[in-house]
Image (cartoon, rainbow, N blue to C red):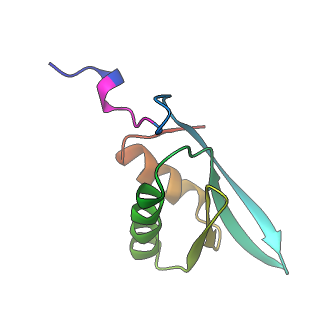
Amino acid sequence: PTTDDTKKRIGHDGQVLQLRVRVEKRRGKPISIVWGFFSHPMELNRLLTLFKKSLGAGGQIVDQSIEMQGDHVERMKKILIDEGYKVK
């Protein structure tokens, strides 16, 4: 039997991750940022690849956060929730 607790993603320190998504403007263009990760770098790379393919936008990993070009907050939240993350 699975419970909701077993479906949540857990960081490498054993804590349940609560991620946040926001938009910033840089050089007049929007950047969507997801932060709050304490995951293995391979997990961040997997998510970055998923975002790039799903959103059709460029992105990068910076200091345990993922930055994507454009305003994709709602779509990124949906993808993260589908992947089992808790998003604020």
Give the residue displayed 42% in from the left and 44% down from the top.
81
* Up/down of 54 relative to 23, above or below: below
Q: In which quadrant will I find the N terminus? A: top left
* Up/down of 8 relative to 62, above or below: above
Which quarter of the figure has residue 38?
top right
Is 26 left, or right, of 67 in this rendering? right
| Dominant secondary-structure state across the stretch colored magenta | loop
> In this orientation, which residue lies closer to the viewer: 26 or 75?
26
Give the residue displayed 41% in from the left and 60% down from the top.
42
Could you say where residue 59 lies in the image, as x and y percent from the top left? 57, 75
Could you say where residue 20 lies in the image, as x and y percent from the top left? 63, 44
Which quarter of the figure has residue 8?
top left
- Please give the range of residues in magenta: 6-10
Give the residue displayed 40% in from the left and 37% down from the top.
9
Q: Is 25 part of what is drawn in magenta?
A: no
> In this orientation, which residue lies closer to the viewer: 6 or 4?
6
Q: How many marks?
A: 0
Which quarter of the figure has residue 63?
bottom right
User: In the displayed image of the protein, which residue is found farthest to the right?
Assistant: 27
Is 29 left, or right, of 12 in this rendering? right
Q: In which quadrant will I find the C terminus? A: top right
Could you say where residue 58 lies in the image, as x and y percent from the top left? 55, 80
Is 62 left, or right, of 46 in this rendering? right
Give the residue displayed 46% in from the left and 29% down from the top.
14
